[in-house]
Image (spheres, grey):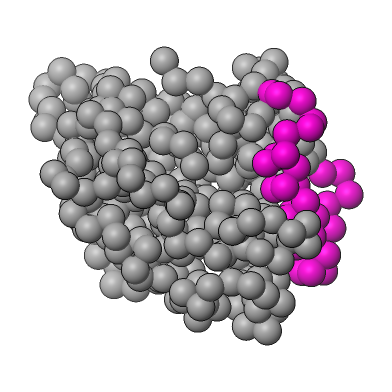
Amino acid sequence: MKSIILSTRLILILLSAMLLLSFKCHTSPPNTSAVSNKIPVSSFLSEKDFNEIFPMHDKFYSYAAFIKAINQLGDIEVKITRRAASVFQIIRTDNTTGKSTIARQDADWNEDWAKAKPDTSYIIDYGAFCSEDNLQTNKRELAAFFAQIAHETRHGEDGKYNDGLMLMHELNTSLTYVANNDDYPAVKGKKYYGRGPMQISYNGNYGYASTCIFGDKNVLLNNPDLVQNDPVVAFKTAIYFWMTPQSPKPSAHDVMTGKWQPSAADKAAGRTPGFGMTINIVNGQIECNKGDNMPNMNDRIGFYQHFLKLLGASDPNCACSCGTMKPYAYN
């Protein structure tokens, strides 16, 4: 998975766009309360099901760890508020206690010039992961999520789509994946190569994930190995990536649940709702807008179709390919 947050300037641009996206792209406004009529993942995915879906998975990636990650992160909501053009506050709420804490507040937050215009906010409810009020929607979303993490973590390819969740980190661990970032600076001597089911990489991504998951950017910045050593944390980073918009990209969750609808710019770029859009979100720069014969893109599609069958779901009108979708560019 390629870097999404590479510098302070880029973070500000991305978060600014994210906030605008929630209002300009016809995305349904996030709910500040718990999702009603939830259908828990554990109610339609048993340990037996999980083991049949991932028959070759490493014992690190256990069903128990997956469900624990869902339940723990599901208690968390994150509110991102933008003040002026580039000043941010992130408030993390633990719904089990009702306690809200400021996980990030930029230095200029209380400056008069920053408060001159109204704030805009966006809330991420991690409890909605594959747990909306429609079982078929949840199964399609879970199949899409599994397809992405299976492709990212398979070791080899046998054409049977049974080889997911095998790698805890990318094979080449010599690269540091460090980029200049004032808000999420790299710790000296640490490497931020791809780890976990979604192969999170770069210090910016580790810091932002840590802010949302733990309310403390330093947890993963100081100890990135936690993602490859603690299976619950590993799954949490994957769920975080799936649920958290990295604007101008929407979240994969909003795509698969129908909450995201393309803007005029998205339509002009060939971006449409469906599984193909999640490929664009995960690795669009490498795999999208290159035609329908990209092996990695087709591997993800193959996993998705395979998992739909195993979960007893279908996606007859699937826009599965991103072959003609332009990837998002960061300027």
Q: Is residue 214 magenta?
A: no
Horizontal relation, residue 118 to residue 148: left or right: left
In which image quadrant can residue 41 be found? bottom right
Q: Residue at x 64, y 72 (%)?
A: 56
Image spot of residue 215 (x, y percent): 25, 56
Image spot of residue 95 (x, y percent): 36, 67
Image spot of residue 298 (x, y percent): 75, 42
Q: Which quadrant is the C terminus positioned in? A: top left
Give the answer, above or below, for where 235 lies relative to 319: below
Residue range highlighted in magenta:
289-318
> Foreground: 56 or 105?
56
Image spot of residue 272 (x, y percent): 72, 31
Number of disc labels: 0
Instruction: Answer whether residue 202 is visible to the viewer in this image.
Output: yes
> Foreground: 86 or 64?
64
Q: Does the magenta stretch include residue 312?
A: yes
Give the answer, above or below, for where 96 lies relative to 326: below
> Foreground: 202 or 258?
202
Instruction: Answer whether residue 239 is visible to the viewer in this image.
Output: no
Give the answer, above or below, for where 244 lies relative to 96: above
Horizontal relation, residue 223 to residue 18: left or right: left
> Foreground: 205 or 318?
205
Q: Residue at x 84, y 58 (%)?
A: 314
Q: Which residue is drawn at 19% across and 22% down?
A: 114
Q: Residue at x 46, y 31 (%)?
A: 247
Horizontal relation, residue 23 to residue 80: left or right: right
